[in-house]
Image (cartoon, rainbow, N blue to C red):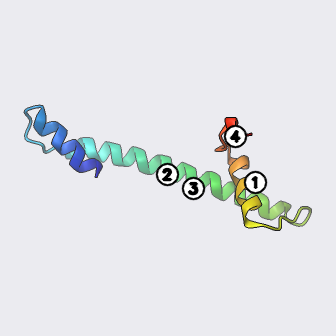
Amino acid sequence: MLWKMERVHKEEDGGDGDDDEGFSEQFSSIMGNYKQYLTRINMALNEKVRKSNKHVVSTKKVKVRYIIHRIGLENPSNT
């Protein structure tokens, strides 16, 4: 979808609409951010597994909230 939006925008500016380089840069940036996000989740899960012997969490909802809190994605206004 980003690619189509980029092509339409370039055509409106009088270009030929063929901007594959711009799309590649955007895609690389998005994938880099996604990879960092997954890495942070993985690190939080690994830490949770290490600590699981001391503290057992019973519900999935609490586990998800714990992970979100640990990786710093929780919205401060919700606390």
The residue sitting at the front extreme is 78
Residue 73 location, x and y as percent?
Answer: 64, 44
Residue 33 location, x and y as percent?
Answer: 49, 46
Circle 1 residues within 10 Å: few <14, some 14–19, many ≥20: some
Looking at the rendered structure, the secondary structure element under dot 3 is helix
The residue labelled by disc 3 is: 38
Residue 66 location, x and y as percent?
Answer: 75, 54
Relative to the observer, which residue lies in front, 3 or 29? 3
The residue sitting at the right extreme is 54
Count the labels in the image: 4
The residue labelled by disc 2 is: 34
Question: Residue type at mark 2?
Answer: Tyr
Question: Marks 3 and 2: in contact by CB < 8 Å?
Answer: yes
- Nearer-N-terminus badge (3/1): 3
Q: Residue at x 43, y 51 (%)?
A: 31
Is 27 displayed left or right of 8 in the figure?
Answer: right
Question: Residue type at mark 4?
Answer: Asn
Relative to the observer, which residue lies in front, 10 or 19? 10
Instruction: Judge depth for marks 4 and 3 and give the one in front.
Output: 4
Instruction: Judge depth for marks 3 and 1 and give the one in front.
Output: 1
Looking at the rendered structure, the secondary structure element under dot 4 is helix
The residue labelled by disc 1 is: 66
Question: Residue type at mark 1?
Answer: Tyr
Q: CA distance from mark 4 to mark 1?
A: 14 Å
- Nearer-N-terminus badge (4/1): 1
- Nearer-N-terminus badge (2/1): 2
Q: Residue at x 64, y 55 (%)?
A: 41
Instruction: Judge depth for marks 4 and 2 and give the one in front.
Output: 4
The residue labelled by disc 4 is: 78
Question: Residue type at mark 3?
Answer: Leu
